[in-house]
Image: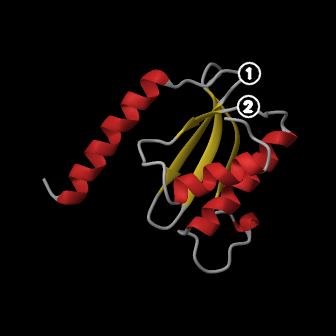
Amino acid sequence: MDKQSQKTVRRTRRRIGLRKRISGTTERPRLSVYKSLNHMHAQIIDDLAGKTVVAASTAEKAMGLAGKSGNSAAAAAVGAKLAERAKAKGVTKVVFDRGGFKFHGRVKALAEAARKAGLEF
């Protein structure tokens, strides 16, 4: 098994362990984060209803990111946009699901921007 496959397997195991403990409700949905090499994706999910309440991504044209979309500044923009959309839908409190990624760099930038924009977690 090559190094990238091992990394993917380890992240998947961490993610499964996290999901055993974290679940989104109607009152406090789950903020799920995914990062790829080039983009950041975040969505707020009501696990009881099985519905995505709001979502934001660097891949959207509405984000208006010129140039690099795989850096901390772009991740912070996603966090701010997600919090703005969530507040418009009436969501203020969420449970943070880092998706098996370490809480640093782009994941941390997204979380801090969402907190600054008004989400509580």
Q: Amino acid at mark 1?
A: Glu
Residue at x 48%, y 48% (from the top left corner): 103
Residue in the foreground of this view, choosing between 91 and 49: 91
Tell me if 89 is positioned left or right of 2 in this view: right
Please tell me in which quadrant of the rendered image residue 58 appears.
bottom right
In front of the other: label 1 or label 2?
A: 2
Under tag 2, what secondary structure? Answer: loop
As shown in the figure, which amino acid type bears the numbered disc 2? Answer: Lys
Crowd band around label 1 with a 10 angstrom C-alpha radius: few (<14), some (14–19), many (20+): few
- Image position, residue 71 (x, y; %): 55, 69
- Which residue is painted at 66% across and 21% down in the image? 25
Residue nearest the observer in this picture, 93 or 82: 93
Classify residue 47 by image quadrant.
Answer: top right
Q: Position of residue 30 (x, y in %)?
A: 61, 32
The x, y position of residue 72, in whole percent, is 57, 66
Residue sitting at the far left: 1
User: Residue 49: percent from the left, percent from the top?
Assistant: 65, 21
Q: Earlier in the sequence, mark 1 or mark 2?
A: 1
User: As displayed, is residue 52 above or below residue 61?
Assistant: above
In the rendered image, which quarter is residue 81 located in? bottom right
Structural distance between the alpha carbons of marks 1 and 2? 8 Å
Q: Is residue 8 left or right of residue 67?
A: left
Decide which of 5, 115 is in the foreground and name it.
115
Please give the residue where the numbered disc 2 appears in the rendered image. Answer: 93
**Pointer 1 with pointer 2, Cβ within 8 A:** yes
Q: Name the residue tied to disc 1.
A: 27
